[in-house]
């Protein structure tokens, strides 16, 4: 029970902080603001997190874990390699859109120094997100490439190529605000990619 309530308090801190960061930006929020938002003392807050940066990283990690869970769920609803890639891609597109608006809203409230600091933090979060995505895709790709007798390194490189191209397509279509086009392109890309491997 105690462990559960500890986890609940931690999640509550992260959810309230997420809203604060979006409303005011990373630089304008103090530990006191977060403590007020969760209606607890600063000592309670410091029990869970040493600093505001630690909270921000944990908020980003929570979002990544939520995206990974949504991805696994969507992929489990379909059977073929191609359909699983499409499901993966669609969740990625939706999550990038959502995170993009979150960061745009945040950055409006921040000065250049704060924005730079946030981007540095985002970089480390990104590499952990990439690792988690690779873990989700690894069994799928190993299975699809089993007949090629590909070693693990080759499979992992193939996943990196898949993910990099996927990010490029999503970035291009979001920059030019062509969302319906993005869905079509992603489906075509997954079709081409899966046929190339199977």
Image (tube, rainbow, N blue to C red):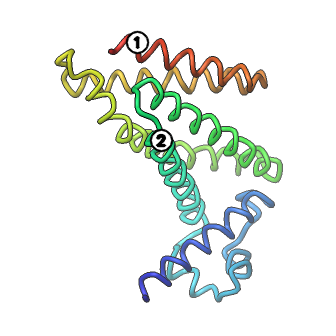
105 over 159 or under it: above or below: below
Depth check: 149 or 171 in front? Answer: 149
**Upstream in the sequence, badge 2 or badge 1?**
2
Q: Which mark is residue 60?
A: none
Rendered residue at 38%/26% (across/down): 159
Depth check: 14 or 191 in front? Answer: 191
Badge 1 element: helix
Depth check: 178 or 24 in front? Answer: 178
Question: In the visual, does 130 lie left or right of 44?
Answer: left
- Residue 18 position by quadrant: bottom right
Q: Callout 2: 10 Å neighbours few (<14), some, many (20+)?
A: few
Read off the residue under disc 1: 195
Residue 152 lies, in percent from the top left, at 22, 28
Q: CA distance from mark 2 to mark 1?
A: 20 Å
Read off the residue under disc 2: 77
Rendered residue at 57%/66% (across/down): 55
Residue 42 lies, in percent from the top left, at 63, 85
Question: In the visual, does 182 lie left or right of 163?
Answer: right
């Amino acid at each position: 029970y105690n462990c559960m309530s500890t986890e609940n308090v931690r999640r509550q801190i992260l959810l309230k902080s997420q809203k604060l960061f979006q409303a005011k930006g990373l630089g304008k929020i103090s530990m006191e603001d977060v403590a007020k938002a969760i209606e607890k003392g600063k000592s309670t807050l410091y029990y869970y997190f040493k600093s505001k940066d630690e909270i921000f990283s944990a908020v980003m990690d929570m979002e990544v874990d939520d995206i990974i869970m949504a991805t696994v769920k969507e992929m489990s609803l379909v059977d073929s390699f191609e359909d699983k890639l499409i499901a993966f891609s669609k969740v990625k597109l939706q999550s990038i859109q959502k995170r993009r608006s979150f960061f745009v809203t945040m950055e409006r409230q921040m000065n250049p120094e704060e924005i730079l600091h946030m981007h540095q933090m985002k970089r480390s979060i990104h590499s952990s997100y990439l690792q988690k995505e690779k873990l989700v895709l690894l069994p799928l790709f190993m299975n699809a490439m089993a007949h090629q007798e590909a070693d693990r390194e080759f499979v992992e490189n193939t996943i990196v190529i898949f993910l990099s191209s996927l990010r490029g397509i999503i970035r291009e279509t979001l920059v030019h605000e062509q969302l319906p086009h993005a869905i079509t392109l992603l489906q075509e890309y997954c079709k081409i990619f899966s046929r190339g491997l199977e």
